[in-house]
């Protein structure tokens, strides 16, 4: 289901599942609350990815995926996919270079974002905020987030 919902972009990204973070959150909820979870996730990214955090890996990734989704130009999509892949490589290097117990920067940023967003008690985010941010660990990451 996940691969189908991501289509060709997923195939170009390789084995990384970070592209699917919002999709996974929506699929973990009951069908009646999926729209609410997706909406809350969008609001959470808007809350977190401000100008001061625009260079953080998670926010860069989010911006690139938004651009990729918005364009229909195959060459532009290919260039954006290359940038996303580069972010994954950098994250892998950062988490591997930190030694045992190092946390993948995507996982750390996501946990920080979710904790901060849910601390504001946003309306309509009950489904999103009911799962612990400390349990987020994308497939293939070399680190995990613990509280």
Image: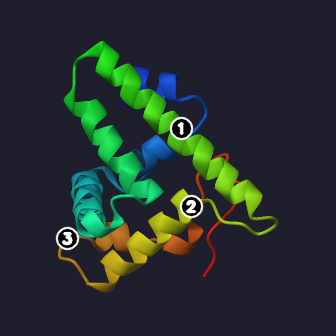
State the residue at coordinates (22%, 63%): 43
In the rendered view, tell whether residue 75 sits above or below residue 87. above
- Say which residue label 3 marks: 124
Q: Position of residue 72 (x, y in %)?
A: 22, 19
State the residue at coordinates (19%, 70%): 124
Residue with the most extreme right position: 100
- Number of marks in picture: 3
Task: Give the position of the C terminus as an image quadrant.
Answer: bottom right
Which of discs 2 and 1 lies nearer the camera? The answer is 1
Classify residue 53 by image quadrant.
bottom left
Q: As rendered, which of 16 and 86 lies closer to the eye? A: 86
Q: Is residue 4 left or right of 138 when viewed as pictured? A: left
Q: Position of residue 82 (x, y in %)?
A: 47, 28
Secondary structure type for disc 1? helix
Question: What is the distance, in whole Å, between disc 2 and disc 1 at their CAs?
Answer: 14 Å
- Say which residue label 1 marks: 86
Q: Position of residue 45 (x, y in %)?
A: 29, 61
Residue 84 in sight in this render:
yes
- Say which residue label 2 marks: 105
Classify residue 56 by image quadrant.
bottom left
Q: Position of residue 33 (x, y in %)?
A: 26, 58
N-term-proximal mark, 3 vs 1:
1
N-term-proximal mark, 3 vs 2:
2
Which of discs 3 and 2 lies nearer the camera? The answer is 2
Local crowd size for mark 1, using a 10 Å CA cut-off: few (<14), some (14–19), many (≥20): few
Question: What is the distance, in whole Å, between disc 3 and disc 1 at their CAs?
Answer: 34 Å
Secondary structure type for disc 3? loop
Q: As rendered, which of 43 and 108 lies closer to the eye? A: 108
Q: How is the image coloured?
A: rainbow
Task: Give the position of the N terminus as an image quadrant.
Answer: top left
Q: Is residue 120 left or right of 23 when viewed as pictured? A: left
Which of discs 3 and 1 lies nearer the camera? The answer is 1
């Amino acid at each position: 289901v996940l691969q189908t919902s991501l289509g060709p972009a997923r195939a170009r990204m390789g084995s990384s599942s970070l592209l699917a973070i919002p999709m996974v959150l929506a699929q973990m909820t009951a069908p009646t609350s999926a729209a609410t979870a997706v909406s809350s996730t969008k609001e959470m990214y808007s809350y977190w990815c401000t100008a001061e955090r625009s260079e953080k890996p998670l926010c860069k990734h989010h911006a690139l995926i938004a651009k990729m989704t918005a364009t229909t130009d195959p060459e532009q999509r290919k260039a954006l996919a290359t940038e996303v892949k580069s972010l994954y490589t950098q994250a892998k290097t950062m988490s591997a270079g930190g030694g045992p117990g190092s946390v993948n920067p995507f996982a750390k940023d996501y946990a920080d974002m979710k904790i901060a967003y849910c601390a504001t008690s946003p309306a309509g985010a009950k489904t999103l905020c009911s799962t612990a941010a400390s349990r987020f660990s994308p497939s293939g990451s070399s680190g995990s987030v613990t509280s």
